[in-house]
Image (cartoon, helix red, strand yellow):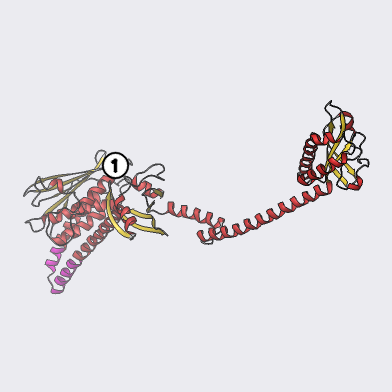
Amino acid sequence: MESKEIEENKGRMALEISKTVSFIPNIIAAFQTSDPSKTIQPLAEKIRKETGAEFVVIGNKEGTRYSHPQTSLIGKKMKGGDNLRALKNGEYYVSKAKGSLGPSIRGKSPIMNKEGEVIGIVSVGFLLEDVHQQIMNNVTKVLLVSLFALLISLLGSILLGRNIRKDTMGLEPYEIAALYKEKNAVLHGVKEGILAIDKHGFITMMNQPAKRLLHINGTVRNLKVDGLFPSDYLYEVLKSGNPQADKEMVWKDKTVIVNCTPLFDENGVSRVVASFRDKTEIEQMVNTISEVKRYSEDLRAQTHEFTNKLYVLSGLLQLGEYEQAIDMIQTETQVLQFQNSIVFNHIKDTKVQAILLGKLGKASEKKVKFEVVSDSQLEALPSHFKLSNLIVILGNLIDNAFEAVYGFDSPTVKFFVTDIGSDIIFEIADNGKGLTEKEIPLLFDRGYTSKQGDEPRGFGLSNAEEAVLEMNGMIEVQSTPESGTVFTVYLPKEYERR
């Protein structure tokens, strides 16, 4: 393709040179002299040397040469047999023929006098050997340039590859792809919320747990973190570059614990990654464990109380006080039969039975009269009534009542339950000092307590209310100063998830 193009270019050049020569006045005038070669040969040679042509041959109408690079050939006939179209028809054209110097590409132009008659011919040519040599030179040049470009490309590829491998820590593309998939799986698989921001505060990544925890739908990429998360804490880490751990903050309706880690590049802190978790869930779990532990302690108190009575009974028998021993057995039996008849005959749910038995033992140890009202009636509870929730609700309310009557004369706590209607109703009443109108609205605030002491308090009633609300129920308080307090809990039998 390139060789053909070079040949065409050489042919056009030869034709253009021949045309130009055919119109030179001195050459046309020389045809009228007695020795045309004397004028034409120097001009033709000068043109040949200036244009780089292999030959510029000018002949008369019969094809006799007036000029030639080899002066010995002047006066002889032109060779090639390709002059006819110019001499006979006055045409301008390109041809290929073998002349005295060898095969060549020629540009042929007729020379005309003032009358328009053909009086001679100009033949300008380039040897095909030279054209082929030029083609080879061009090919060689192209090959050398290509080879040089290839070497430069290889060198550039090696340097670029080293730079990329440095940035990718020597990992191959398939390894990077595998790591990317693993990272996404880990980010969306962990329960903790994770988000990352750049140094301008735009979110670059947020996993699904974070979106659920912050109540965010849709994509947040390239959005400002302001308004979506407590941003002051993140900006502080961006500015200082110091990691922060276990920072507790309140966001909307949740208490979250946040850890922030800065990421560095050559210019300093480039971004911050924050992980956070819902403290509310942790608190609920701790509270549940605490209530189960309290339930276990109640059962141990019941065991301890009966152990003490057995020791007393053993002592009476060893001393021979058989009548007192019998009286004690009968008294305890009557009390247990009365309590158990209500607990086991009127209350059919084993979870509530277990809680009440534990509290009966604790009441006996605290010298508090704990009565299960004989009108109580409860069948087996629905499956969504979990033991942990019942322990939190009933355990806290009954313990609170025990504490309310502690130190009073005839301390009494009454428990009533009924499942008549669409709700399960629990009622715990005490004959303590009661509450004022100002105290009642504060009862369920976390940390609030009317009791004295160094122990952390004010969480039991708050936990009980949270458990009631979780079951879609409600809790009411009625109290009269110096007369006592009544807590009433309403829990629907049908549970609808909110």
Image quarter hosting the N terminus: top right
The image shows residue 446 at horizontal and vertical percentages of: 20, 52
The residue indicated by pointer 1 is: 493
Around disc 1, counting alpha carbons within 10 Å, would you say few (fewer than 14), some (14 to 19), or many (20 or more)? Answer: some
Q: Quadrant of the C terminus?
A: top left
* Residue 350 visible in the snapshot: no
Residue 117 in the image: state x and y as whole percent: 86, 27
Left/right of residue 190 with respect to residue 104 in the rendered view = left
Residue drawn at (45%, 55%), measured in percent from left and top? 186
The answer to whether any part of residue 209 appears in the image is yes
Q: Nearer the viewer, residue 3 or 229?
A: 3
Task: Tell me what residue is drawn at x 81 percent, y 49 percent.
Answer: 130
Residue 478 at what x, y percent from top left? 13, 44
- Above or below, 457 against 208 in this view is below
Q: Nearer the viewer, residue 67 or 18?
A: 67
Instruction: Tell me the chief SS of the magenta region.
Output: helix
In reply to whether residue 126 is colored magenta, the answer given is no
Q: Is residue 324 magenta?
A: yes
Q: Residue 411, position in %: x, y?
A: 10, 55
How many labels were placed on the picture?
Answer: 1
Of residues 226 and 282, the one nearer the viewer is 226
What's the magenta region?
A: 307-328
Circle 1 — which element?
A: loop
The amino acid beneath tag 1 is Lys
Horizontally, is 103 left or right of 347 in the view? right
**Residue at the farthest front position:** 34
The foreground one among 176 and 224 is: 224
